[in-house]
Image (cartoon, helix red, strand yellow):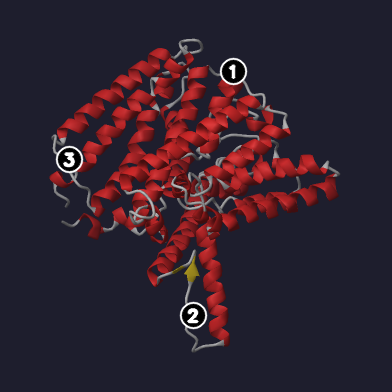
Amino acid sequence: MVALFNILPVIQILGFLLILLSFLMTLPVNMLMLGDTPDWLAFVKSASICFGVGLVCFFSAGRKRHALKQRQMFILTVSAWVFIPLFSSLPLLLSDLKLSVTDAFFESISGVTTTGSTVMSGLDNLPGDILLWRSIMQWMGGIGIIGMAVAILPFLRIGGMRLFATESSEWTEKAVPRTNRLARGLVFSYLALTFGCILTYWALGMDLFNAVNHALTTVSTGGYSTSDSSMGQFDQLSILFASSLFMMLGGIPFFLFVRLLNGQVQPLLRDQQIHFFLKFLLLIACLITIYRVVNEGTFPVDAFVHALFNVTSVVTTTGYASQDYALWGPFVVVLFFFLTFVGGCSGSTSGGMKIFRFQLSMLLLREQVLRLLHPNAVIARHYNGRIISDEIVASSVAFSFIFLATLAIVAAILAALGLDLVTSLTGAATALANVGPGLGDTIGPAGNFQTLPDAAKWVLMVAMLLGRLELLSVFVMFSPHFWRS
């Protein structure tokens, strides 16, 4: 077994994260200035608990700073995404909402993983402090996702993420900043997009409270809203179009924003992943627009804006809805089911399988076709101007297999718990891909997860974590070899 002193660096960092979380818990009360904070005492108690536990964890590891090794990074990555949602659920659990432990943890784990599935209804009548805390959970989860995708997963060789190691953290001094400046650049980019989104929403007619809440959950591609009707509460095409643009920005690799801050425009303009991502969104939105105009006679501009918004929301795994797209026809429903798996770009706040894995699959398909025609040919795989190693291909294939296998297992378990086929299949897909709403009357864009049995909610919570952590970083910890000293 791993010796206790090897876990101390992990405990120390977890303590630091809990201390940060305790300060974030005071934001709903401070930002609303007791104007709409009937649960202020719940936030104070929760912040005190987090701060106390964080201090104990931080100082129990001693004052010495410990460098993390690869095995410890695996443990830290998984444990952080378990303990942060656990403590984040305290304000919900201690509030006057009377949520069960299951529902409170489901809401927080869905928030921190930016999945956006909810068990809460009557959002229009909830107090401001609870609504704001839900948004803050997603916002802090978003910055955590960026940090994990840029600084940790590439070096753990997870699911082909090694492909982006040189772009995110191994740049030369002449090209871009070193790691500490990279971290500051990522935080600055995230904050700049958030404030830009707030000002845009506010200028387009949202009140400041809604502008702040929706900006926090748009840039983080989380999808929590302040109303049961989600973004459908704002009957303005301009707001939906602006939201689509900011969701796209949230789905773009954030390390490219850092390069942009340092005057490097070309990497952003030439990135193959971004090109495919944007073209894909526009193509699918146009297909749905044509389908609705022909079959429903919908006004083209209205159809396009709603199609672009909902397609971008699902592909970037945000989970907003402007309308119940399940009513747009069977073609659209089937299309949205497959869109659930796509995801945004690597290094963004989005979930899903990620665009680059589909691009790698197409490169492999092309290679196999060429080998059939030219068996002795030497074919090099290139992506973004670099040769793709067999290691990256194998890792990506392994991820795709384990993703589909896990999807089948989760769907089967949900069906065994009494859920219907559509709810089981789309519930498993939306949890693993961290999208939010599924399909059907129960968990579709017009429903929520409140009526599901508690056992199904716990299964979905595990699936959310697995999807957010790219699956392999969790499964590797179940290997006996991992725990051998």
**Upstream in the sequence, badge 1 or badge 2?**
1
Position of 379 relative to 195 (above/below): below
- What is the spatial separation of the Cα atoms under label 1 and label 3, in whole angstroms? 47 Å
Neighbourhood count class around disc 3 (C-alpha, 10 Å): few under 14, some 14–19, many 20 upward: few
Q: Which residue is mark 3?
A: 65
Q: Which residue is mark 1?
A: 125
Secondary structure of the residue carrying tag 3 is loop
- What is the spatial separation of the Cα atoms under label 3 and label 2, in whole angstroms? 47 Å
Position of 271 relative to 177 (above/below): below
Q: Which residue is mark 2?
A: 379
What amino acid is at disc 1?
Answer: Asn
Residue 2: image location, x then y, percent: 17, 51
**Upstream in the sequence, badge 3 or badge 2?**
3
Along the viewing direction, whichever of 117 and 442 lies nearer the viewer: 117
Residue 274 located left or right of residue 478: right
Q: Residue 113: which quarter of the image?
A: top left
The answer to whether any part of residue 452 appears in the image is no
Secondary structure of the residue carrying tag 1 is helix
Secondary structure of the residue carrying tag 2 is loop
